[in-house]
Image (tube, rainbow, N blue to C red):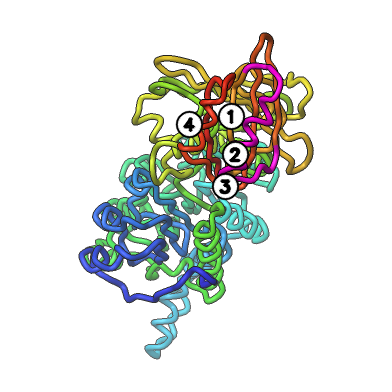
Amino acid sequence: MIEGEDIEVDILPTMSEDELCKAIVDYDALMIRSETKVTKKVLEAGKKLKIVGRAGVGVDNVDVETATQQGVIVVNSPDGNTMAAAEHTVALMLSMARNIPAAVASTKSGLWERSKFTGTEVFGKTLGIIGLGKIGSHVAQVALALGMKVIVCDPYTSKEAVEAIGCEYVPHLDDFWGRCDFITVHTPKTRETTHLINKNTINRMKKGVKIVNCARGGIIDENALKEALEAGQVSAAAIDVYEAEPDIKSSPLLNAKGNIVLTPHLGASTSEAQLNVAIDVAHQIKEVLSGGSATSAVNIPSLKPEKLEPVKDYMQLAENIGELVQQIAEGNLKSIEISAKGKLASVDISPLETAILKGIFSSFTDNVNYVNAPILAKQKGISVTTSKSETSGDYIGLITVKLITNVSESLVSGALIAENISRIVKIDQYNTSIEPEKHMLLLPHENKPSMIAKVATVIGEYGININHMHVVQKQGEYSMMIINTDCAVEKEVLNKITQIDGVASSKYVKLSA
């Protein structure tokens, strides 16, 4: 899935940190599953790394903060194992409710203990779901089909979205714990969710509650759960994930008395899910290495598909505007003002802000990308402000970027004049309409005869072809030639052009277009 004309793939065994540090030096991308730990040390050793792909949902085994600082994109596959994880959650819930694992072991030993394994029906019971993402949503739908009542607590999901699938929204956990017969968690492990289920919260639950965790180890305090099982406060538990993986010998749950079902992190372990997540991440790695964007980057929140879709046609233009305005600016950058007008005023333009920052910083800093561009602005103490207005004059959507330095202000505006047809429409005080191309010349000059011919003659002498030219005039005696060429323009050429009588200055600009 990854290999192509310019991409080679090596399949390596699981390595220790030191082994991976030695190996990673030569690689542009790293694709991993859950056992490989991508630490700060590994990331710092991977000088060429552009992307780390986790074939799965969780990225607990990747130092995302260091990756972001290093400009390394971290991607996962949030959808590839959705069905597998949801089905395993339901399977564990039913196995726990009907005592299936213990009954299997008893029967296989030759016993017939029907009365000992009397179970509990889920029909009519209340299932509490913490976290209504894709997995939690599918669990909810299955539970509803089984005749359960489902209540949901998720601060990142609206009441309307919860009610739309037939569940009840509970805004606070304080009102949640005591209402559930069954509880399942479907959240990432964060500072807020670590030991979310603990001695205190368990004591606030219904006596005899049953708990399932197929999300992340550490969301449940295992010592507290063991105590609650043995005291009867929790009547059953089904656990697929643990605080210490894969070495779980120290887990107190292994010796817990009572009805407890344990599986070794099998939530995504179906042949379909393993293949789906690998293909998804492979596609993203190939796309990024080919100059494209990832669809599930965990450290580029502004480029999530739902945010990118409304502004995707403006992304390259926004980056070009950033590149152009930085290269015409003089002095040390102090602040950046971004303005979006017209139809852009009604959508989230954070992806465009990221593209603009990438364009600005790539003009004077190496290895800038969508990951680290916003971080560079913060690290350098550069103020970034954004404004919106529904008025845009002659354009459907207009982007303007102003750079303020210690000595001057520079401004560039761009717009789409038709689908996929972008134009630079203003440079400082000059209104224009020219295509942003890779090589551009900006030549302010006196508005007098023969200026175009003189400039074109010098350019021709050096064998440089002119693709497009646009001459614009501002109020007063000066005009500006904006010229697209088919190659870079060296300093020698610029110096000769500047020597032409009437040419105020000459500036070569290189864009990524």
Disc 4 to disc 1, C-alpha distance: 13 Å
Instruction: Specify start and end residues of the magenta stretch as a single range.
Output: 446-468
Q: Earlier in the sequence, mark 2 or mark 3?
A: 2
Whether residue 151 can be seen here: no
Q: Nearer the viewer, residue 332 or 338?
A: 332
Element type where label 4 sits in the image = helix
- Residue farthest to the bottom? 110
Q: Residue 221's spot in the image, x, y percent?
A: 31, 51
Q: Which residue corresponds to mark 4?
A: 495
Residue 458 is drawn in which quadrant? top right
Label 1 crowd (10 A; few <14 / some 14-19 / many >=20) = some
Q: CA distance from mark 1 to mark 2?
A: 13 Å
- Tell us which disc is closer to us: 4 or 1: 4
Along the horizontal axis of the image, is 453 left or right of 78?
A: right
Of the image marks 1 and 2, the number of the one nearer the N terminus: 1
C-alpha distance separating marks 2 and 3: 11 Å
- Contact between marks 1 and 3 (CB within 8 A): the answer is no
Q: Callout 2, which amino acid?
A: Ile
- The residue where tag 2 is placed is 459
Give 416 or 277, whichever is nearer the viewer: 416
Q: Which residue is mark 3?
A: 487
The numbered disc on residue 442 is: 1
Looking at the picture, does residue 215 appear above or below residue 100?
above
Q: CA distance from mark 2 to mark 4?
A: 11 Å
